[in-house]
Image (cartoon, rainbow, N blue to C red):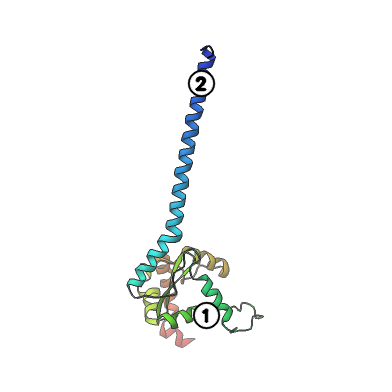
Amino acid sequence: MGLLTASNCIDRVKLRDVQEWQCVVATACTVMSVLLVARTFYLLLWKPYSRRRFYEKQGIRGPCFRPIVGNLPEIRELRASLPEVCDPSEPGARRVGLEFFVFSEKYGKVSIFEQGSLTRIILADAKLAKEVLVAKAGHYHKAALNGEVFNQIAGISSILIANEGDWKQKNHIMTPAFRHTFLEVC
């Protein structure tokens, strides 16, 4: 054994401190990794699955649940198999939403599907759509991502994607333009 000197003691203390810090950092990294995996599992698997079960208990059906990808493969197949409705060379012409008609025919006027991990409800009943969009618009929240995408495409903030207070303000401004007396003049 070597002599126990002051420098040897200091080196051992430094080594012990470094090892303790390495242990703390390794533990913190492990905890963060576990939390990240748990959050990913919750957002991509558990939340969409529990939403799907919630709606199915109420009698709302749709294509079978697929984790992570949702019903995007079925939607892609439907879009590929449906005929072109309009001339694709026309500016702004796109085939949008025809799979929703297929889903509503197959699963009912109120049906459900997933776009990735996002759960979507299809309302093919005009009375229900009016209730959601007009009568009880403050009770239903629209996805923020849809609003951002629509704003970038259209360049405006629309009443169709507005939430709560913003929707009430836009509706109050637009309502006089659609009164029967005003429409008769036009």
Element carrying mark 2 = helix
* Residue at the image point whose x is 54% and y is 15% from the top: 7
Tell me the crowding category of disc 1: few under 14, some 14 to 19, or many 20 or more residues within 10 angstroms, Cα based.
some
Give the residue drawn at x 53%, y 20%. 11
- Distance from the alpha carbon under mark 1 to that under mark 2: 72 Å
Towards the viewer: 8 or 118 = 8
Residue most toward the left?
58
* Residue 22 in picture, x, y percent from top left: 50, 33
- Residue, disc 2: 12
- Say above or below: 131 vs 85: above
Instruction: Identify which amino acid the numbered label 2 is placed on.
Output: Arg
22 left or right of 51 in image: right
Nearer to me, 118 or 152: 118
Helix, strand or loop at disc 1? Answer: helix
Residue situated furthest bottom in the rendering = 184
Q: Residue furthest right?
A: 89
In which image quadrant can residue 181 be found? bottom left
Residue 186 placed where, x, y %?
49, 86
Determine the residue positioned at 58% across, 84% down.
Answer: 83
The circle drawn on residue 98 is 1
Whichever of callouts 1 and 2 sits on the residue coming sooner in the sequence is 2
- Provide residue 164's location: percent of width, then percent of height: 39, 66
